[in-house]
Image (spheres, rainbow, N blue to C red):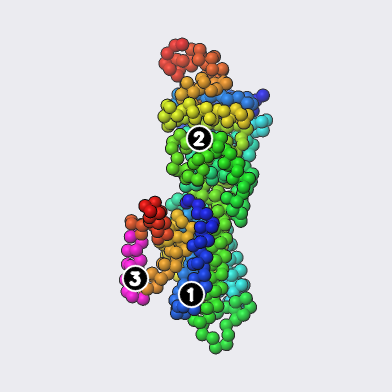
C-alpha cells in the first residue's frame, strides 16, 4: 500500500533542474534508500516532501491527502518527519530537552506558558525512554552542543523519531562520522525504525550501508529517477553502475 | 542556558528577597528610591531578555513599550482624572500591549539586523508622535503624573513624597517585581519557554518539530511588551513626569545595556544589570560631566572582557572554583 506518492514533481533553481517531473512512491512499512551522486536531487526531493521547499509544479499525496500546499507543521501533524544531513539540534538545550520538545509539540503542549516543563513526568519519562532506545540516556543532562558527532547524529534522528511519525526521512544519518561508528549507528536506527513499524526513507552515499539495511532502493540522477528496485536488482543494474561508479557490472 | 534546579534558585533568592524587604529600615530613603527605579528597570529588562536571551531577537525598540506604559498612565490622569495605581498599571499595560501587538505583527516576520532596525524605526515613529502632538502628549514638556493611591489608600496629608516613595511605593513595586520574576521564571521553564529557546538555537529545526516559529515569536513579543509596559507604568509615578525622552531609541539602548551588563545568557543577569546600571548612571552623572564617556568605557570593557556580563562571569568563576576544590 502506497503511503506517499509524488506525481510529476518539479523544482528548478534557475537553469538547474533539481527535481524534474519525479514520480516517487513509498510503500507502508518499508525501509527505502534514496541514492544518487551529489546534485542528483535527493535532498531537494526530501525538502519538497517535508515542506522546506515549495514545488514549482506537481503533487505530493500522503495517505491519500494532497499535502503539496501544506505548511511544515501541517505535514508533521499528518505524520511526516525528517532528520538533516548537517546535524540540526538545539545546541544550548539539554539532550533530554531536545527530545522533550518534540513530545511537547506532538501533544500540543508547547503553548503552555504557566507550567514547568520539567514537572511533566509523562513527557520526561517518554523522552528518557527515547534516549534509552538510542543509547543516549547517559547524556540526558548534557547540552546537545557538547555531544560527539556520532551522538549528535543519533540525537538528530531521535528528535524526529520522538514525533512518532508515520514516515521518517533520514538524510545521510552516517555522514561525518567515522567508518567504525557507521554500522552501530545504522543498527540502532534501523532496529528502532523496524520495531516501531515506521516507514523510513534513508538518503545515503555509502553503498555498503544502503545494500545492507534497505528493502528497496531508488536511484536518482540529474533530478530524475534512474532506477527503482530491490538491492539485488540495483546491484546488477548496468545503467546504475555506469552512472554511479563509472563502470559496467 | 543550562537549567538551574528551582530548589537551588530558591536558596539564593529567598535571602535576597528578605534583604530587599528589610532594606527601607537600614538605608536612607534616597537609596531606597534609587533601588525602586532599579527594580522598575529590572522588570523591563526581564521582558526584553525574553526576546534576546530566550528567543534570539535583539530589539532596539523597547523604549516604545516602556514609554507607552508611562504615557498610558499619564493619559489616565489627563483624561480620566484617576490617580489609582491599579488603574495606572492596567492602563499602562493595555497601551503597551496594543503597540506591541501592532509592532510585533510586523517585526516577527524578520530576524537579526532586520528585526533590530525595524523595531528601532517603529519605536521612533512613536517618539516623533509624542514629540509633535504636543496638545495630546505635552510635547517636550511631557505630562505630569501625581503620586497615586496604592490599593485605594493615598498619601497621608502632609506626608513627605520621598518617604512615601521609599517606603509604601517601594514595597508596592517590590511585590510586583517579585511576582514578575516568579512568573517569568515559570514562563522560561515552561514548554513554551523551551520552544522559544529552540527557535533561538535553530529556527529551521524548531519548524521541523512542529513549532510555528512566527506565532511563538509573536507571543514572546507580546509578553515582552507587557513586562516593559508594566515597568513604564511603575516608573512614571516615581519620576512624576513622562517626556518623549523615554520613547527615544537611546532609551532602548539603555535596556540593551542593562541586559548586556548583567548577562543576557542568564535568567538573573538582566535584573542585576538594570539595578547596577541605574546606580552606575546616577553616580556617574553626579560626579562628572563626562558620564556618558564613563558608561561608554564600561560597555566597551564588558563586550571585550566580560561577554557573559556580571552574572555570567560570576557563574563561570564559581564553577571553576567548585571544580578546583
Same-chain status of marks 3 and 2: no
Residue A172 visible: no
Pair 1/2: label in front: 1
Name the residue located 46 percent from the left edge and 72 percent from the top edge.
B35
Q: Residue furthest top?
A: A249
Query: In this picture, which residue range is highlighted in magenta?
Result: B286-301
Pair 3/2: label in front: 2
Residue position marked by numbered label 3 in the rendering: B291
Q: Quadrant of residue B206?
A: top right
Q: CA distance from mark 1 to mark 3?
A: 28 Å
Name the residue located 55 percent from the left edge and 48 percent from the top edge.
B195
| Residue B299 belongs to magenta span | yes
Same-chain status of marks 1 and 2: no
Name the residue located 45 percent from the left edge and 54 percent from the top edge.
B265
Do the CB atoms of the residues marked 1 and 2 lie less than 8 Å apart? no
Image coords of residue B82 (percent x, y): 62, 77
Residue position marked by numbered label 2 in the rendering: A154
Amino acid at each position: 500500500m502506497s503511503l506517499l506518492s509524488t506525481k510529476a514533481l518539479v523544482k528548478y533553481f534557475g537553469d538547474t533542474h533539481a527535481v524534474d517531473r519525479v514520480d516517487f512512491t513509498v510503500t507502508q512499512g518499508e525501509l527505502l534508500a534514496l541514492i544518487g551522486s551529489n546534485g542528483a536531487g535527493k535532498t531537494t526531493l526530501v525538502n519538497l516532501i517535508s515542506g522546506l521547499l515549495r514545488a514549482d509544479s506537481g503533487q505530493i499525496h500522503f495517505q491519500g491527502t494532497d499535502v503539496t500546499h501544506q505548511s511544515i507543521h501541517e505535514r508533521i501533524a499528518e505524520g511526516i518527519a525528517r532528520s538533516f544531513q548537517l546535524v540540526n539540534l538545539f545546541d544550548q538545550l539539554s539532550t533530554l530537552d531536545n527530545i522533550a520538545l518534540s513530545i511537547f509539540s506532538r501533544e500540543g503542549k508547547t503553548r503552555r506558558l504557566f507550567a514547568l516543563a520539567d514537572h511533566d513526568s509523562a513527557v520526561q519519562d517518554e523522552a528518557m525512554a527515547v534516549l534509552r532506545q538510542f543509547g543516549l540516556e547517559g547524556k540526558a543532562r548534557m547540552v546537545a552542543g557538547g555531544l560527539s558527532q556520532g551522538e549528535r547524529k543519533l540525537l538528530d534522528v531521535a528528535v524526529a523519531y520522538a514525533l512518532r511519525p508515520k514516515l521518517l526521512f533520514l538524510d545521510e544519518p552516517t555522514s561525518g562520522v567515522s567508518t567504525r561508528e557507521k554500522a552501530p549507528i545504522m543498527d540502532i536506527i534501523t532496529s528502532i525504525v523496524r520495531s516501531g513499524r515506521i516507514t523510513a526513507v534513508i538518503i545515503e552515499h555509502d553503498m555498503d550501508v544502503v545494500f545492507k539495511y534497505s528493502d528497496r532502493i531508488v536511484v536518482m540522477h540529474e533530478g530524475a529517477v534512474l532506477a527503482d528496485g530491490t538491492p539485488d536488482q540495483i546491484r546488477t543494474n548496468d545503467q546504475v553502475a555506469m552512472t554511479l561508479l563509472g563502470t559496467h557490472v | 542556558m543550562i537549567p538551574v534546579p528551582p530548589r537551588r534558585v530558591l536558596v539564593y533568592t529567598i535571602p535576597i528577597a528578605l534583604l530587599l524587604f528589610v532594606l527601607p529600615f537600614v538605608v536612607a530613603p534616597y537609596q531606597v528610591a534609587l533601588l525602586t527605579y532599579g527594580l522598575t528597570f529590572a522588570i523591563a529588562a526581564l521582558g526584553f531578555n525574553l526576546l534576546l536571551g530566550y528567543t534570539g531577537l535583539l530589539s532596539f525598540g523597547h523604549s516604545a513599550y516602556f514609554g507607552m506604559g508611562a504615557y498610558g498612565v499619564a493619559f489616565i490622569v489627563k483624561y480620566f482624572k484617576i490617580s489609582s495605581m491599579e488603574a495606572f498599571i492596567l492602563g499602562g499595560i493595555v497601551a503597551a500591549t496594543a503597540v506591541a501587538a501592532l509592532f510585533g505583527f510586523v517585526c516577527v516576520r524578520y530576524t537579526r539586523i532586520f528585526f533590530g532596525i525595524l523595531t528601532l524605526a517603529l519605536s521612533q515613529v512613536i517618539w516623533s508622535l509624542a514629540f509633535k502632538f504636543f496638545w495630546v502628549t505635552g510635547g517636550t514638556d511631557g505630562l505630569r503624573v501625581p503620586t497615586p493611591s496604592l490599593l485605594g489608600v493615598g498619601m497621608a496629608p502632609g506626608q513627605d513624597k520621598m518617604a512615601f516613595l521609599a517606603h509604601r511605593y517601594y514595597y508596592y513595586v517590590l511585590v510586583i517585581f517579585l511576582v514578575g520574576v516568579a512568573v517569568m521564571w515559570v514562563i522560561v521553564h515552561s514548554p513554551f519557554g523551551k520552544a522559544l529557546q529552540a527557535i533561538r538555537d535553530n529556527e529551521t529545526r524548531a519548524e521541523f518539530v512542529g513549532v510555528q516559529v512566527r506565532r511563538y515569536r509573536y507571543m514572546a513579543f507580546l509578553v515582552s511588551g507587557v513586562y516593559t509596559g508594566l515597568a513604564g507604568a511603575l516608573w512614571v509615578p516615581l519620576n512624576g513626569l513622562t517626556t518623549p525622552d523615554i520613547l527615544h531609541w537611546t532609551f532602548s539602548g539603555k535596556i540593551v545595556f542593562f541586559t548586556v551588563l548583567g548577562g543576557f545568557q542568564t535568567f538573573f543577569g538582566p535584573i542585576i544589570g538594570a539595578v547596577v546600571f541605574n546606580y552606575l548612571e546616577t553616580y556617574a552623572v553626579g560626579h562628572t560631566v563626562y558620564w556618558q564617556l564613563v558608561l561608554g568605557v564600561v560597555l566597551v570593557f564588558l563586550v571585550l572582557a566580560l561577554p557573559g556580563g556580571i552574572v555570567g562571569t560570576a557563574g563561570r568563576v564559581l564553577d571553576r572554583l567548585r571544580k578546583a576544590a
